[in-house]
Amino acid sequence: MVISSAPQPQPSRALLSFLQQKMGLSENAINLGLRQAALEQAPLPVVLWSFGLLNLSQYQDVLDWQHQQI
């Protein structure tokens, strides 16, 4: 569990689409991640990685993608 003291912003539609289309996550996996991220107040990619839904390489790809979106 990764509990944060500050609420995290809702993930963007673009991130959710990236996770599903490029990372190959199912809608169920993303929904599980969203529920757990809200519960833990943690970033969605961290939760997905901690649950084993993303491997370390995929997690890095998500972080790189997010950095490019800024």
Image (cartoon, rainbow, N blue to C red):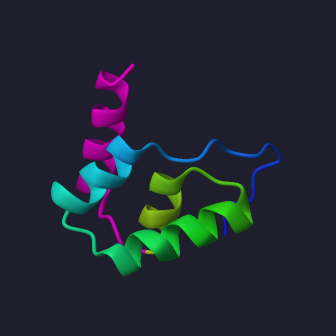
Residue 2 appears left or right of 20: right
Residue 41 appears left or right of 36: right
Residue pictured at 64% horizontal, 54% vertical = 42
Question: Taking 11 as reference, is 20 above or below it?
Answer: below
Image coordinates for residue 17, horizontal then vertical, percent: 28, 52
Magenta stretch: includes residue 63: yes
Magenta stretch: includes residue 20: no
Question: Taking 22 as reference, is 15 above or below it?
Answer: above
| Residue at the limit of the structure toward the bottom, as seen here | 28
Residue 69 appears left or right of 23: right
Image coordinates for residue 66, horizontal then vertical, percent: 36, 33
Residue pictured at 25% horizontal, 62% vertical = 20
Quadrant that contains the N terminus: bottom right
Question: Taking 60 as reference, is 21 above or below it?
Answer: below
Q: How many marks?
A: 0
| Residue at the limit of the structure toward the front, as seen here | 13
Residue pictured at 67% horizontal, 45% vertical = 8
State which quadrant residue 54 falls in: bottom left
Q: Nearer the viewer, residue 15 or 6?
A: 15
Q: Nearer the viewer, residue 12 or 5?
A: 12
Image coordinates for residue 51, horizontal then vertical, percent: 47, 74
Quadrant that contains the C terminus: top left
Image coordinates for residue 39, horizontal then vertical, percent: 72, 67
Residue 8 appears left or right of 58: right
| Residue at the limit of the structure toward the top, as seen here | 70
State which quadrant residue 69 falls in: top left
Residue stretch in magenta: 52-70
> What secondary structure prevails in the magenta region?
helix
Q: Nearer the viewer, residue 5 or 25?
A: 25
